[in-house]
Amino acid sequence: MSVIEKKQELEAYFHEAGKPRERWRVGTEYEKVGIDRQTGQAIPYFGRRGVEWILRELTERFGWEPQEQDGHIIALSRDQAQITLEPGGQVELSGEPCENIHCTYAEFTRHVRELIEVCEPLGIIFLGLGMQPVSRLDQIEWVPKKRYRIMAPYMPTVGKLGQRMMKQTATVQANIDFLDEKDAMMKFRTGMGLTPVLIAMFANSPISDGEMNGYRSFREHIWTDTDKNRQGLLEFAFAPEASFAHYVEYALDVPMYFIIRHHDYVNVTGMTFRQYLQYGHDGERATIEDWADHLTTLFPETRIKRYIEVRSVDSQPPDLMPALSALIKGAFYDNDCLQATWDLVKGWSWDERMEVYLDSHVNALKTRFRRHLLLDIAKEFLEIAWEGLHRQHVVNDFGDDETIYLRPLKGLLDQGKCPADVLLEKWQGELHKDIKKLIAYSAYKLP
C-alpha cells in the first residue's frame, strides 16, 4: 500500500482521474427495496427467502461471481458491473461505465429480468420507491458487512436518523467523468446547485412505516439528521475559486469510520483524516487506499471521487430509472448546456439554497423560489438536457436518440407532478390506503 508522504498527493488523486472527452462514460447505481409480497415487510438477509439466497441464485443462474465476508455473500460481480447490498438488504446494481444511456437501459433491464426470475417464485418483489413503505427500523435485519458493524453504532452518536438512512432508504445515482480540475469543479458546483431541483423532480418517498410521513421525499429529510459532518450541501462548492484543494480540506476534517488492514476493518471512528494523516493509528500510516475508502464515506449531495457523483434522487419506478443519467449526460456532457444549467441556479444566495433545499423535501415541485416554483426551473432544466442529448445524437437500433429516456419524466412535469404526487393521489384514492394495493402498484414488473 502507498503511504501518503504529503497532502499534495491527496489532490493529485483527483487530478490524475481526469479523462479526455472521448473516454467519458456514464455510470448509474440503482438501489431497490425488496419486500415480502404478502406482508409488505422488508425481506431479511438470512434464510431461504432472504437476500443472501437471492444472491446465491443469481450466481448459479446468471454467471455472477460472489464476494464473501465471514462466509456470507455480500456482493456479486460480472464484467464491469457489481451487485452490492445496503445495510437493510437493499439490492444495488452498480452498473458498468456506459458510453450512452441505451447501454445503461439495456443493462438495467437485464438486471430487472434476472431479479424477477429469481424472486417471483419466492414471493419476493422489489418496489419502485425511495423507502421501505411498511417495515419499521427495528423490523429490518442488518446485512452482515464489516463496515456496517462500525457504522451502525456510530450513527446514533451523530444524528437521530442515520440508521433509518442505512436500513430504510433507496436512491438512484448518476456518475460522470471530467476533463480536468476546472471541468470537475464546474460539474461539482452545478450538481450541488441543482440539488433541490433534482429532489423535486424525482421525490418518491412519501410513505413509510405504513402511512404518509408528511414529505414528498422523506429520504432526503432523513439525510438532514444523519451526520452533519458529512452530508448535505457544501457551501464552498459555490465559490468561484473552489478547487480540488478545497474538497481535500473538507474531506480531511470529516471523521473517519474505518481503515482496512489484512482484509479486516479497523474502527477509527471519531478521528479525522487530518489527524490520521498526522499521527497515524496504532502504528498504521495513512495510505492512498485509506483515502479512497474515506472518500466513499462522505455523503454530500454531489460527491467527488475519481469521478463526479450526483446523489440527490430517490429510487424510482423502472420507467424513470434511466431518466437521471439521461438528464445528467445531456446537461453535463455539452459545454453550452452545462453553462445554461449552471445559469439556472448560479444567482441563488446560500440562505436561499438552504431554504429551497429543505422546502423541496416537503413540497417538491410546488416549492417556491422567489416568484417561481421549482416546477418552472425543472422544466427549463429538462429542456436543456433534452437539447444536449439531441446534440450528442446517439441513436439505438430503432433510430431513437437518448431523449426517449426523458419522455416519462417530461410526461410527469407536463402535469406538474413528481412521482410522490402521483403516489399520494393514488394512496388516498383508488388504493384506499391499502398496503397490498400499494405493493401491487409499486412492484417491479418485467419490462
Image: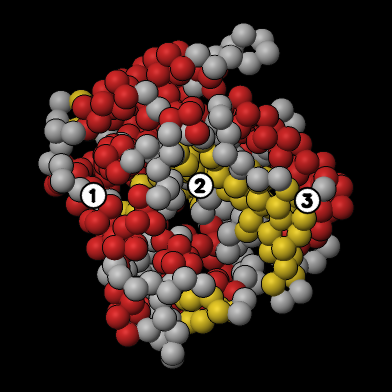
Q: Secondary structure at mark 2?
A: strand
Tell me, for residue 171, which label it has, or none. 2
Residue type for callout 3: Trp
On screen, 407 above or below 226? above
Q: Residue 420's spot in the image, x, y percent?
A: 46, 36
Query: Eyeballing the image, is 335 above or below 54?
Result: above
Q: For this rendering, which residue is in front, 155 or 403?
A: 403
* Along the line of sight, the residue nearer the viewer: 240 or 420: 240
> How packed is label 1: few (under 14 Cα within 10 Å), some, or many (20 or more)?
some
Q: Position of residue 242 (x, y in %)?
A: 20, 48
Q: Is residue 277 left or right of residue 144?
A: left
Which of the 4 image quadrants contains residue 404? Answer: top right
Q: Which residue is mark 1?
A: 243
Disc nearer the start of the sequence (1/2): 2
Residue 379 visible somewhere in the drawing:
no
Residue at 32% across / 24% down in the picture? 335
Residue at figure coordinates x 42%, y 48% from the top left: 17
Left or right: 154 in relation to 56: left
* Amino acid carrying mark 1 in the image: Ser
Which numbered marker is on residue 64? Answer: 3
Label 2 vs label 3, nearer the camera:
3
Above/below status of 384 relative to 230: above
Image position, residue 180 (x, y; %): 33, 41
